[in-house]
Image: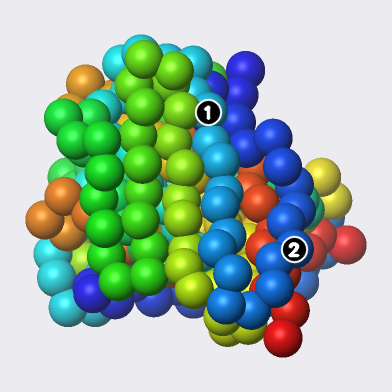
Amino acid sequence: DQQVKQNSPSLSVQEGRISILNCDYTNSMFDYFLWYKKYPAEGPTFLISISSIKDKNEDGRFTVFLNKSAKHLSLHIVPSQPGDSAVYFCAASAGRDSGYALNFGKGTSLLVTP
Amino acid sequence: GAVVSQHPSRVICKSGTSVKIECRSLDFQATTMFWYRQFPKQSLMLMATSNEGSKATYEQGVEKDKFLINHASLTLSTLTVTSAHPEDSSFYICSARDRGEQYFGPGTRLTVT
């Protein structure tokens, strides 16, 4: 059963505009959320994370928003650049109780067009 | 960030043979490493948690006798796919924890013919 869901398999955005990638989760025990960027045939690269005690975390062009009541988080990339084109995975962890293992969504393929 | 390597990056083997994949943390020590598997256009599925000096913890549905995990040192975990079958063909990725973050290796593409 998929505990982390990314319902949009793909997203296309023009360069300079905002990219918004969404993620929903079902397990209320999750307390740490991460976004990873992945290219084909490579391992995921960590982008940004957020703890459940926060509702927003910002790092340069990347901002993650967390809405615990809705069990929803989103990644905003602004301005989007062609180099941002990749698959983005949302992941969640229940921390020490789960051995810090990550539960991944199926990913959203982002294409940023010039 | 911390660096995790995997070897080999690609391997092709015949049905019935065994394949060993190595995962190394290059610039930090990792008491815990994780092994994931990814099918095309699917999410990364956790297979097992590898703990240095103790037995691995396998996720439900993962055969521990088929996917042997050894965490021999604080910088090395190995995954051995025993008696490989074509359905074991997949992309295997390891990760290691360093100061609360997980860092992923580049992955190993296994093809069983």
Nearest to the eye among marks 1 and 2: give it. 2
Q: Which residue is identified by label 2?
A: A12
Residue B78 visible (yes or no): no
Query: Total of numbered circles in the picture?
Result: 2
- The chain identifier of the residue carrying mark 1 reads A
For the residue pair A107 and A74, the one nearer the viewer reads as A74
- The chain identifier of the residue carrying mark 2 reads A
Image position, residue A96 (x, y; %):
18, 28
- Residue at horizontal 49%, vertical 73%? A79
| Label 2 packing within 10 angstroms: few (<14), some (14-19), many (20+) | few
Q: Earlier in the sequence, mark 1 or mark 2?
A: 2
For badge 1, the amino acid type reads: Asp
Image position, residue A77 (x, y; %):
47, 63
Q: Are marks 1 and 2 on the same chain?
A: yes
**Marks 1 and 2 close (CB-CB < 8 Å):** no
Whole-number angstrom distance, CA of label 1 to CA of label 2: 20 Å
Q: Which residue is identified by label 1?
A: A24
Residue B91 visible (yes or no): yes
SS at badge 1: strand
Q: Is residue B84 left or right of residue A16?
A: right
For the residue pair B66 and B33, the one nearer the viewer reads as B33
For the residue pair A68 and A43, the one nearer the viewer reads as A68
- Residue at horizontal 37%, vertical 70%? A61
SS at badge 2: strand
Q: Quadrant of the N terminus of chain B?
A: bottom left
Which circle marks residue B69 in the picture? none
For badge 2, the amino acid type reads: Ser
Q: Residue furthest right?
A: B113
Q: Quadrant of the C terminus of chain B?
A: bottom right
Q: Is residue B72 left or right of residue A10?
A: left
- Residue at horizontal 43%, vertical 21%? A71
Quadrant for residue B51, please give it.
top left
